Each structure stands twice: as structure tokens, then as C-alpha cells.
Image (tube, rainbow, N blue to C red):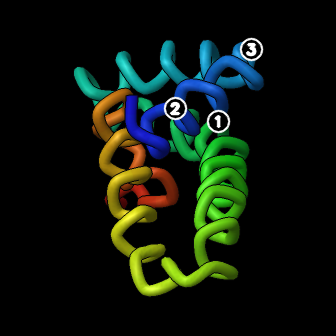
Amino acid sequence: MTKSKKQVMEMIEAHKDLFTEFREIHDKYAVTPDELQEKFNEVGKKIVPLVQRWENNLCSKSESTKYGKFSSGLADKFWAEVRAHFPKIDYVGLQKKK
């Protein structure tokens, strides 16, 4: 298992309740995004900073070593793994059409 994949699994396990709540709204949002954008944003605004914190934790370890130049690639792999679990995470924060 890659380092980024392991970090994502640990993050989801450590915050199981929050990610379970997000999974429920995420799956419903995938079907009816217009109706659920506000609720999706509300739940997602708790998730995105959490994911960013775990990303920073993962990358900060490699940035302080001789492998610092690879940390951006590690961050990309981390986010790719997050998107594998939650493909719509990039839609958190979008505003509903009026």
C-alpha cells in the first residue's frame, strides 16, 4: 500500500463519523446536485480543511528531507486517492444557480 493511500485510509478511519456523514450526502449529491448543493457545502466545509490538514501532515514529512522536490507529486497522489473515495469533493463550495 502506498504512503498516500495509507494516509487517506487512516484519515477516514480517524474521523469515521464525519466521513460517514459526508459519504451519505456525497452519494445523494451525485444524483441530485442542484437540490443538495447547500447541504453538500455545509457538510463539505468540515471535510475539506480536514483533508488539507492530513495532506500537509503527509507532505511536510517529505519536504524537510532530501525528497522535498517530490512532495507535490505526493500531494497529487493523496488527492487522487481522496477523489477515488469521494469523486465530487471538488464541488464543495460551489454556489447554486439562481
Q: Residue 17: which disc? A: 3
Q: Residues within 10 Å of mark 3 (few under 14, many from 20)?
A: few
Going by the numbered disc 2, the residue's amino acid type is Lys
Say whether residue 91 is visible: no
Amino acid bearing label 1: Val
Where is residue 89? Give x, y as percent. 41, 45
Quadrant position of residue 70? bottom left
Question: Horizontal placement of 15 versus 88: left or right?
Answer: right
Front residue of 33/53: it is 53
For the residues labelled 1 and 2, the Cα–Cα distance comes to 24 Å
Which callout, 3 or 2, points to the residue nearer the camera? 2
* Residue beneath the point at 43% across and 51% down: 78
- Give the vertical position of 23 relative to 91 (above or below): above
Q: Amino acid at mark 3?
A: Asp
Contact, CB < 8 Å: mark 3 with mark 2? no
Give the x, y percent position of residue 61: 68, 66
Q: Secondary structure at mark 1?
A: helix
Observer-nearest of 10 and 63: 63
Helix or strand or loop: what does disc 3 sit on?
A: helix
| Numbered disc in front, either 1 or 2 | 2
Residue depicted at 63% across the width and 79% down the height: 65
Q: Nearer the viewer, residue 89 or 74?
A: 74
The spot of residue 17 in percent (x, y) is: 74, 14
Say whether residue 56 is left or right of residue 93. right
**Residue marked by disc 2:** 6
Q: Which mark is residue 43?
A: 1
